Image: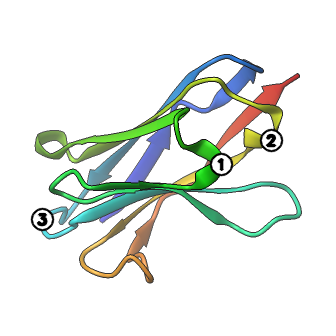
Amino acid sequence: VQLQASGGGLAQAGGSLRLSCVLSGSAFGMNGMAWYRQAPGKQRQLVARISRGGNTKYADSVKGRFTISRDNAKNTVFLQMNSLKPEDTAVYYCAATGSSWIDMDYWGKGTLVTVSS
């Protein structure tokens, strides 16, 4: 299983970016997909997660601004990021799990999001 994230870049505060992550390989059984981020000098944190059935969970810091969605037919998960803030600057990683949200089974390489003030 491989995860390929894309869509990062530079945005101004208040702007938007959309991240995509394609899951390839033996994708069958990967029920949960999520986005994490890690800012310089900080620990990696969950941004949002979505189950195969569409149940979602968000970090408090992004609620109302970010939306996670997925296209099961294309094994793709998206993160729509609106009203971006400088504190959203981080490397964003997508991850997939077959069962446990605690231990994600697969991780993609990160994509850098930089938000300027």
Q: Secondary structure at mark 2?
A: helix
Name which residue lies at 25% across and 79% down. 99
Q: Is residue 59 left or right of residue 12?
A: left
- Viewer-nearest of labels 1 and 3? 1
Left/right of residue 35 with respect to residue 39 in the rendered view: left
Q: Secondary structure at mark 1?
A: helix
Work out how far the residue at label 1 is from the one at label 2, CA to CA, in angstroms. 10 Å
Q: Is residue 92 left or right of residue 94?
A: right
Residue 89 visible in the shown view: no
Percent from the top left, x then y, of residue 18? Answer: 49, 27
> Which residue corresponds to mark 1?
61
Residue 67 seen in render: yes
Residue 13, position in %: x, y? 77, 21
The amino acid marked with disc number 1 is: Ser
* Secondary structure under the numbered disc 3 in the rendered image: loop
Q: Residue at x 34, y 59 (%)?
A: 33
Q: Which residue is mark 2?
A: 87
Task: Check disc 2 and give the amino acid type.
Answer: Glu
> What residue is shown with label 3?
28
Badge 1 vs badge 2, beta-carbon distance below 8 Å: yes
Q: Is residue 31 left or right of residue 106?
A: left
Numbered-mark total: 3
x then y, percent, for residue 97: 32, 72
Label 1, label 3: how many angstroms apart (C-alpha)?
31 Å
Q: Quadrant of residue 95?
A: bottom left
Give, as a three-letter code, the residue at label 3.
Answer: Phe
Q: Is residue 69 above or below residue 27?
A: above
Q: Position of residue 83 (x, y in %)?
A: 64, 23
Q: Residue at x 18, y 57 (%)?
A: 52
Colour basis: rainbow
